Image (cartoon, helix red, strand yellow):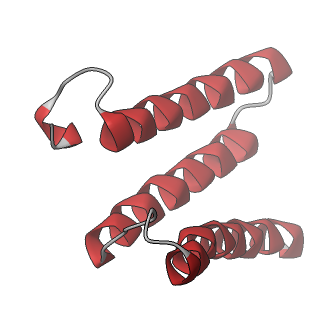
Amino acid sequence: MLTQNKRLIGIVLTVAFLLLIPLVAMQFTNEVDWGPFDFIVMGILLLGTGLACEFVLRRVRNKEYRLFIIGAILVALFLVWAELAVGIFGTPFAGS
């Protein structure tokens, strides 16, 4: 039980650390221009991905299925991230 709680704390701390990267970059360059909404959306994406992977690790016992599902979750994260960043699919979510 303690190990599982440590993993959840690790997920939250990793998300916080990853969100600090653009926050620090904004202090040094004008090329990174994130607003509060950007931080909220990326925080939800990262935390949701981390929690979904944790759920799979806890529930799925077959290693092949586990790797496939986690891989699919990560591919979905990268596709949503790319769509929101540059609009590779041209959906209204990209802002283009």
Residue 74 drawn at (x, y percent): 60, 33
The answer to which of 44 and 29 lies nearer the viewer is 29
When the figure is inspected, residue 55 is found, relative to residue 38, above or below; the finding is above
Q: Quadrant of residue 27?
A: bottom right
The answer to which of 1 and 44 lies nearer the viewer is 44
Q: In which quadrant of the rendered image does the N terminus lie?
A: bottom right
Q: In which quadrant of the rendered image does the C terminus lie?
A: top left
Left/right of residue 31 with respect to residue 91 in the rendered view: right
When the figure is inspected, residue 7 is found, relative to residue 96, above or below; the finding is below
Residue 79 drawn at (x, y percent): 44, 29
Residue drawn at x 79%, y 66% as measured from the top left? 7
Left/right of residue 94 with respect to residue 62 in the rendered view: left
Instruction: List the single residue furthest toward the right.
Output: 3
Residue 41 drawn at (x, y percent): 35, 61
Residue drawn at x 57%, y 23% as measured from the top left? 72
Residue 37 drawn at (x, y percent): 27, 70
Q: Quadrant of residue 65?
A: top right
The answer to which of 57 and 35 lies nearer the viewer is 35
Total number of numbered labels?
A: 0
Residue drawn at x 70%, y 76% as measured from the top left? 13
When the figure is inspected, residue 87 is found, relative to residue 52, above or below; the finding is above
Q: Quadrant of residue 10?
A: bottom right
The answer to which of 64 and 88 lies nearer the viewer is 88
Instruction: List the single residue furthest toward the bottom.
Output: 27
Left/right of residue 67 with respect to residue 40 in the rendered view: right
Residue drawn at x 84%, y 23% as measured from the top left? 63
